[in-house]
Image: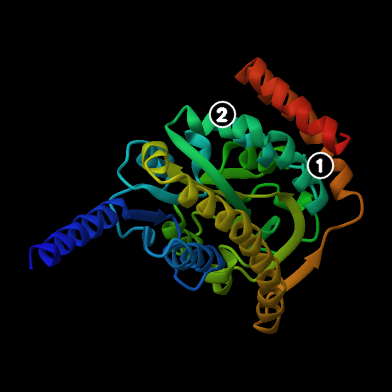
């Protein structure tokens, strides 16, 4: 009897220790729509982590606007431990060095993006670490093109029009072609388009245009820049995981980040077809517009880097070297 009681006590201790090792993370994403590739990708990560760690780590994802965290504060919230894990599209306020990847007309295709991100990744890991955040991976949206309420056949048609942008760098692009750049939250876009506060947006067919297409009858397929989201974790929470769980989480994110990018790329074509069928006029970029835009924006890349300091100049040069610009 005593032996059985002793065995039972040992089992209870072992079970308690196992339970103590299990980690439950709170996760957040800027996206408020559960059907987007971004949210589906984050949900896949959560599901795979629970399964592949046998419950040692579980992740509960909260959609955008369901927690009191502003989109621009997600990286800070992760660093402060308000949430343990997140996808952040608006990270550049906290890690401005990463904005070199989003400079208009610098990176113009998938191959250039892959080379530029690989070259920048060590510096980005270090920059996020300074915010008490572990950079685990990323996913990228399709190219940001121009959607408008007015007819547009070339970049010259932007002159005199008010366009919503998501960064100062995108704003500079619009201003170089005589437009007025306006920054406002995504939730304000539909009413602002209806009221004429803005007359267009820079986004992707599988991004903002997926929700706002009814207000935007014209799409000029000129790739201004790319936008990407970082997949990040709180440094203390990550360090508290076992080495095995850390490795599994990294491996899962390394697979699901690119899978999310691929899903966005596929959805871009689907949404373009759907938007055209619904009456949107889609116009391919005019001959000469890309070269004209590069000539206008190249001096801005250099001025932007110089204004921000040697670290930014080095980052810009790193990117230019690997993509040959």
Task: Locate residue 261 relative to residue 229 in the image: left or right.
Answer: right
Left or right relative to 10: residue 118: right
Query: Count the marks: how many?
Result: 2
Quarter of the rendering containing residue 296: top right
Residue assigned mark 1? 293
Instruction: Residue 205: tell me if it is visible.
Output: no
Q: Earlier in the sequence, mark 1 or mark 2?
A: 2
Circle on res. 148: none
Where's residue 281, x and y in %?
73, 73
Name the outermost residue toward the right. 287
Measure how far apart labels 1 and 2 are at the Cα level. 32 Å
Q: Residue at x 42, y 37 (%)?
A: 235
Q: Are marks 1 and 2 in contact (CB under 8 Å)?
A: no
Side of 169 relative to 246 (left or right) = right
Query: Which of the 4 quarters of the picture holds residue 318?
Result: top right
Q: Looking at this view, is 31 or 281 the one in front?
A: 31
- Residue 108 place in picture, x, y as percent: 80, 48
Give the secondary structure at mark 2.
Answer: helix
Q: Residue furthest left?
A: 1
The quarter of the image holding the N terminus is bottom left
Find residue 173 and report its horizontal and vertical position in percent.
Answer: 69, 41
Residue at mark 2 = 126
In the image, is residue 32 above or below residue 67?
below
| Residue 246 placement (x, y as % from top left) | 48, 47
């Amino acid at each position: 009897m005593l032996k059985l009681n002793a065995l039972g006590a040992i089992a209870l201790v072992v079970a308690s220790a196992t339970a103590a090792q299990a980690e439950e993370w709170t996760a957040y994403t800027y996206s408020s729509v559960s059907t987007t590739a971004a949210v589906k990708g984050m949900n896949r990560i959560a599901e795979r982590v629970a399964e592949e760690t046998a419950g040692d780590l579980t992740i509960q994802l909260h959609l955008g606007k369901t927690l009191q965290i502003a989109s621009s504060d997600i990286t800070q919230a992760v660093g402060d431990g308000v949430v343990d894990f997140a996808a952040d599209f608006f990270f550049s306020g906290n890690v401005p060095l990463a904005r070199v990847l989003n400079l208009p007309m610098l990176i113009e295709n998938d191959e250039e993006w892959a080379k530029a991100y690989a070259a920048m990744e060590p510096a980005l890991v270090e920059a996020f670490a300074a915010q008490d955040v572990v950079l685990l991976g990323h996913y990228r949206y399709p190219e940001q093109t121009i959607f408008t309420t007015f007819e547009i056949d070339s970049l010259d048609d932007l002159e005199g029009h008010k366009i919503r942008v998501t960064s100062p760098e995108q704003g500079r692009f619009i201003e170089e072609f005589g437009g007025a750049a306006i920054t406002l939250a995504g939730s304000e876009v539909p009413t602002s388009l209806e009221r004429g506060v803005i007359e267009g947006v820079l986004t992707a067919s599988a991004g903002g245009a997926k929700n706002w297409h009814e207000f935007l009858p014209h799409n000029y397929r000129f790739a201004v820049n790319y936008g990407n989201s970082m997949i990040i974790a709180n440094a203390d929470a990550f360090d508290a995981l076992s080495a095995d769980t850390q490795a599994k989480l990294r491996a899962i994110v390394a697979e699901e980040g690119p899978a999310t990018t691929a899903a966005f790329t596929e959805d871009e074509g689907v949404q373009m077809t759907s938007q055209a069928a619904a009456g949107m006029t889609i116009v391919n970029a005019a001959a000469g517009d890309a070269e004209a835009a590069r000539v206008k924006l190249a001096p801005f890349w250099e001025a932007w880097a110089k204004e921000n300091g040697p670290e930014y100049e080095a980052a810009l040069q790193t990117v230019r070297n690997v993509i040959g610009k």
